Image (tube, rainbow, N blue to C red):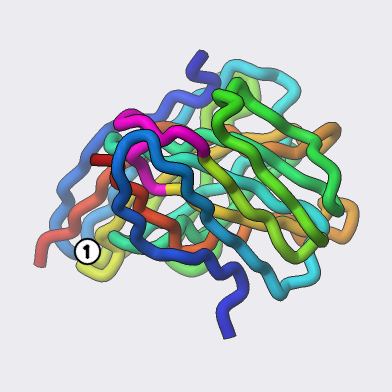
Amino acid sequence: DTAVSQTPKYLVTQMGNDKSIKCEQNLGHDTMYWYKQDSKKFLKIMFSYNNKELIINETVPNRFSPKSPDKAHLNLHINSLELGDSAVYFCASSPPFAQGLYGYTFGSGTRLTVV
Amino acid sequence: QQQVKQSPQSLIVQKGGIPIINCAYENTAFDYFPWYQQFPGKGPALLIAIRPDVSEKKEGRFTISFNKSAKQFSLHIMDSQPGDSATYFCAASSLIGNEKLTFGTGTRLTIIP
């Protein structure tokens, strides 16, 4: 039973298109994240939601819009895709540190290729 | 701004050797230092983590050494195996506040038989 699942796993699309990536976690965590991993493997946080509330929004173009319909889901919508958006996008979730169990659980990633 | 610096970028070690990966941080507010392991086509997975109140932590063949005054920490893998070949990321976070993880740039480790 997958803890953090992302769909689709691969996404190939043309410049200018709009696309969405979906993420679901069944761990009961309150906090969810989107990370971008570029071609050099660098992991950079994009957004974080805590119980459906946006708490981190790192200098990301406003073409990227996250949405959290409930605390188990965090989706990422990207408008007007550009070549530079090609990367692997990871969803992750974590429990609050106060519970004494801390660590991110990552999904397996969505490889986005813009052509 | 690169707040967590990781080296080396890549590392090749013979089976049974002890690869060492080093990280340095700048933000003195960081108080949680995990290491993640990533295999090709998979997401990073938590390997081991340390808080600054201890100087060393061991879990199986993996050891974190932590030097608070130098703001450095490192991962050692004892008796390394070809199955340990992966990309390793150090990370740091302040557990007060928004708890986001800042990752190092990654080390591609290859263990040769």
Q: Which residue is most to the top?
A: B1
Would residue B96 be found to the left or right of residue B13 on screen? right
Locate residue B52: give its quadrant. top right
Q: Position of residue B84 (x, y in %)?
A: 30, 64
Is residue B71 visible to the viewer in this orientation of the structure?
no
Q: Is residue B12 above or below residue B71?
A: below
Which residue is disc 1 drawn over? B16
The residue shown at (71%, 75%) is A26
Crowdedness of circle 1 by 10 Å Cα count: few (<14), some, many (20+)?
some
Q: Which residue is most to the left?
A: B113
Which residues make up the magenta segment? A79-88
Is residue A104 visible to the viewer in this orientation of the structure?
yes
The residue shown at (69%, 29%) is A57
The residue shown at (63%, 38%) is A65
- Front-lying residue, A90 or B13: A90
The residue shown at (44%, 24%) is B5
Would residue B25 be found to the left or right of residue B104 on screen? right
Q: Position of residue B28 (x, y in %)?
A: 70, 19
Q: Amino acid at mark 1?
A: Gly
